[in-house]
Amino acid sequence: MKIIPYGRQFIGNDDVKAVKRALKKDLITTGKEVKNFESMFSKKTGVKYSVSCSNGTSGLLLAYLAIGIKKNDVIIMPSINFVASINMAYFIGAKVFLTDVDPSTGIMRAKDLEACIKKYNLKKIHTIVTMHNGGIPSNMKNFLYLKKNIGLILLKMHVTLLVEAIYQKRKKLVIVNTARSQFFLSIQ
């Protein structure tokens, strides 16, 4: 059977050199290389602070805590998602509601979000977690419109945000970098 990969990584010579350099240091997980990476990343993206994590699950937990999610807060996210998104919300004690998604893309649409809010009669929503999936972006204009009218935090989770952040100089950016892949969170 032929395997069709979900995605492919690109590891260049500079990446290999950086790993070799880090492995030769006394501290490979908390040393100078990490501080240099975080500093360089902050400068490149135009944010004040960056924190690297050992995996995406840890990064999600930090992101949720950074935006003040606590026990019994309502979070809405798409039903097609990374399990860590839901698990970390449950870990904090948040109430998670899952929306339907576009059957052809697997992406939550604004109308799916509105239907979820109506179905469960949700009044006080803390955070909406959107997710770009398989290279297909969410229509963020519609979510920003809802954010303005409902008054909540919008947390975008996708792999293309880094490029967007560099060009748009977002000031509230939470980056999650895992050992096997990277994805980025933006708080709006």
Image: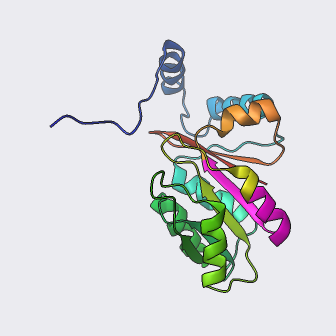
Answer above or below: position of 60 versus 30: below
Q: Is residue 186 left or right of residue 103?
A: right
> In percent of the image, x 48 and y 39: which residue is there?
181
Image quarter for residue 72? bottom right
Q: Quadrant of the image for the N terminus?
A: top left
The front one of 169 and 103 is 103
- Quadrant in the picture for the C terminus: bottom right
At 53% across and 50% down in the image, what residue appears? 56
Residue 171 x, y percent position in the rendering:
84, 44
> Total label count?
0
Q: Quadrant of residue 34?
A: top right
- Image: 73 above or below 64: below
Residue at x-position 60% and y-position 79%? 93
Q: Report the residue that reaches farthest toward the top.
A: 13
Residue 141 place in picture, x, y as percent: 75, 51
Question: Residue at 44% across / 29% down in the picture?
Answer: 9
Q: Is residue 174 placed above or below 126 in the rendered structure?
A: above
Q: How is the image coloured?
A: rainbow
Instruction: In this rendered view, identify the residue nearer to me: 188 or 78.
Output: 78
Q: What residue range appears in magenta? A: 143-157
Residue 123 pos. (x, y %) = 75, 83
Residue occupying the far left of the picture: 1
Residue 126, percent from left and from top: 74, 72
Q: Quadrant of residue 137?
A: top right
Judge whether residue 103 is colored magenta.
no
In the foreground, 53 or 105: 105
